[in-house]
Amino acid sequence: MPGIVDVTANEGGVGRVVMENKALVLVAGLGRGPFDALAPVLDRQKLEVVKLSTPENSVELVQKEPFDLVIFNAEVKKGTLEQVVDAIRHGMSASRNTSILVLAGRNQVDAVRRLVGRGVNRVMLLDDPPELVGQQVAELLNIAPRANLRFSTRLQTAVGDGAVEILGEIVNLSATGMLVETDSSFEPCQQVVVTINLGGQQGPVSAKAEVVRLARNDRGGIEGVGLHFLSFAGDGKEKIEAVLDEAFTEPPIN
C-alpha cells in the first residue's frame, strides 16, 4: 500500500499534513472498492496519499497545504462540485495550482466534463481500469526521475528590503526540482534563488525556485524543503540534465 494518511475519523478538525519527499496526493470521496483498486497503482508511483471521505471535507485542508494532485469522486453531498473546485482554485489557496482529476459515474460524466478548463484538468469514469487512471495520474503529476545525489546549495530568500542566505544540502535532484536538507523555515509557495555547487567541470548552477513541499523528520524523513524550479540562469538547465543523465546511466556489465 502507498503511504496513506486516512483522516476520515478526524475530518471535523483536520490538522497540518506533514509532507515527505514524495508527491502528495489527496483522494476524496472514493468508496472502499474503487480506492482499493486504485491503491496498488498509486503505490507503484511512490506517492504520499491523504484519504478523505468526501470532496467537500477536503477544502480546508487543501487550501492550507500544497497538494500535487487532487482526485475527487464527482459525488458531492454538500453544495456542488463546482463550488469545491472554485474554493481550491481561490487565490489564497496553497493548492490553487494543483491538478484536479475527477472520477465520475456514467450518469454524471457529461456534466462534470463541462468543468474541464474551468478548474478541473481531467475527467474519467469510476469504472475505468485502474491502470488507465494511473496513466492519467502520472501525466498530471509530470513525475520526473529523481537521483539520490548530494550537492551543497545556497538558498537566498528575501526578508523585508534585504535578503538572507541559507546553506543546505541537496538530498535528491530531478530536472524539475530538488529536496534540500535544512533546518531553516520556509512557507508554501515562497520563492527563492538557489545556487547549486555541482563541482567538477559543471560548476555552479543558479535558478529561481518555489517551495512546494515541507519535509519533517518526525515522520521518518529528513528535515528540509522541496523546491520546484521556475527558471535557470544561462545553461543551468542543461548542466542539471547532464548530471542526471550520468547518474541514471547504468554501469557497463563486466
Image: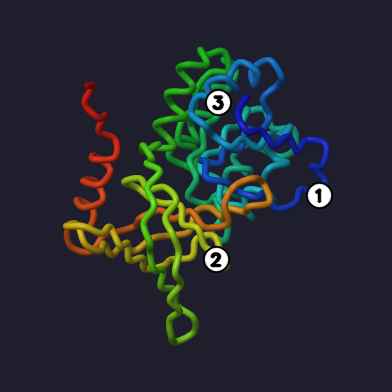
Give the crowd class for mark 2: few <14, some 14-19, many >=20 residues within 10 Å: some
Q: CA distance from mark 1 to mark 2?
A: 24 Å
Identified by mark 3, the residue type is Asp
Q: Is residue 166 left or right of residue 82?
A: left
Is tag 1's residue or tag 3's residue first in the polypeptide sequence? 1
Closer-to-camera residue (72/38): 38
Give the crowd class for mark 1: few <14, some 14-19, many >=20 residues within 10 Å: few
What residue lies at 57% left-to-right and 52% top-to-bottom? 222
Please state the horizontal and vertical placement of residue 34, each as a whole percent of the image. Answer: 64, 17
Closer-to-camera residue (33/17): 17
Closer-to-camera residue (225/218): 218
37 vs 83: above or below: above
Identified by mark 2, the residue type is Phe
189 vs 78: above or below: below
Please state the horizontal and vertical placement of residue 11, each as a whole percent of the image. Answer: 79, 42
> Which residue position is annotated with label 3?
43
> Which residue position is annotated with label 2?
186
39 vs 155: above or below: above
Please state the horizontal and vertical placement of residue 142, each as a whole percent of the image. Answer: 38, 37
Q: Nearer the viewer, mark 1 or mark 3?
A: 3
What is the quadrant of residue 145 in the picture? Answer: top left
Identified by mark 1, the residue type is Gly
What residue lies at 19% left-to-right and 51% top-to-bottom? 238
> In the image, which disc is placed on residue 214?
none
What is the quadrant of residue 103 in the picture? Answer: top right
Please state the horizontal and vertical placement of residue 140, each as a whole percent of the image. Answer: 43, 35
> Which residue position is annotated with label 1?
13
Closer-to-camera residue (216/52): 216
Q: Element under label 3?
A: helix
